[in-house]
Image (cartoon, rainbow, N blue to C red):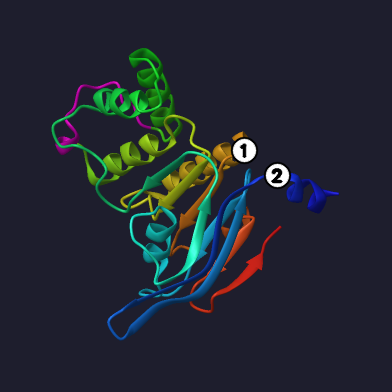
Amino acid sequence: GAAGAAGDRPVRRRATGISKRYGRRSVLTNVDLTVRAGEVAAIVGANGCGKSTFLQICAGLISPDRGEVVVDGRLSYCPQQGGTYDYLRPDEHFVLVGGGSDWSRQRSRTAGRAGAAALDWDASAPTLARHLSGGTRQKLNLVLAGLGEPEVLLLDEPYQGFDQVAYHDFWQQVLRWRQRGAAVLVVTHLLSHLDLADTVLDLTTAERSHRR
C-alpha cells in the first residue's frame, strides 16, 4: 500500500530529541522529525516558537543542547534573507553555486534560468543582485537552493516579498522537488497550502499531524 511504499523510501533527515535553550528561555524541547525521500514537511507555529532555530540545527549551522540530527544526501539551505551577493549577476550566482556540484557553466546557467522561469522571473538580464527587488532577490535565493539537485532542501520562509501568484509558484516548485525524490522542509507562518505537505510539525505544541 501507500504506507508501505513510503516506508521503503530512504530517510533523508532525522532529528531526534532536539532541545535548545538561550539563557533561561527554552526554545525547543525534545522535538522529533523524520523526513523521507519524496516527502515535504511543513514546520509551523507561533512567532518565537523556534522554527528558524530548528531549521538551522537541521542545517548544522547551530548545535542543539540535546538531541541528534542525521542527514543522508546533499543538503541545501535557503535562509529568510541573505544568500546572495550584491555585486554578482544572476547568471554569475548560478555558475558559482552550480560549480559546487561540478556542473559546467552552461548547465548551471541553463538550470538557473529554468528555475527562475518557473517562478515567473526572467533571470537572463545582467542586473546586479543589489538592484533586484526584495521579492526577486528572494526568488534568486530560492533558485540557488535547488541548483545541484540536492537530496535535502531546508527552506526558511523563502517567499518573503512574493505576491500571491509567486507564492503559488513557490509551492509548485516544492512539489517538483518532492516528485524528483528530494526531502523538503519548509518553515512557514502561512497556513495556506499546508495540505500539500506530507507532515506538519507544529512547534507551538511540538505535535505532528499527518496530512497524507
First to last magenta residue range: 121-131
Q: How crowded is mark 2: few (under 14 residues within 10 Å), some or many (20 or more)?
A: some
Contact, CB < 8 Å: mark 1 with mark 2? yes
Q: Which mark is residue 95?
A: none
Q: Is residue 197 left or right of residue 190?
A: right
Residue carrying label 2: 9
Q: Measuring 38% from the left and 50% from the top, which residue is drawn there?
A: 159
Secondary element type, mark 1: loop
User: From where the camera sits, is residue 178 visible?
Assistant: yes
Q: Measuring 54% from the left and 75% from the top, which residue is drawn there?
A: 206
State yes or no: residue 8 in magenta: no
Q: Which secondary structure is most common in the magenta stretch?
A: loop
Residue carrying label 1: 181
User: From where the camera sits, is residue 192 visible?
Assistant: no
Instruction: Tell which circle, 1 or 2, labels the residue nearer the N-terminal end.
Output: 2
Kind of residue sitting beneath label 1: Gly
Query: Which x, y percent locates residue 163?
Result: 37, 49
Find residue 75 and report its image quarter.
top left
Query: Which x, y percent locates residue 47?
Result: 37, 74
Vertical comparison of 175 with 51: above or below:
above
Kind of residue sitting beneath label 2: Arg
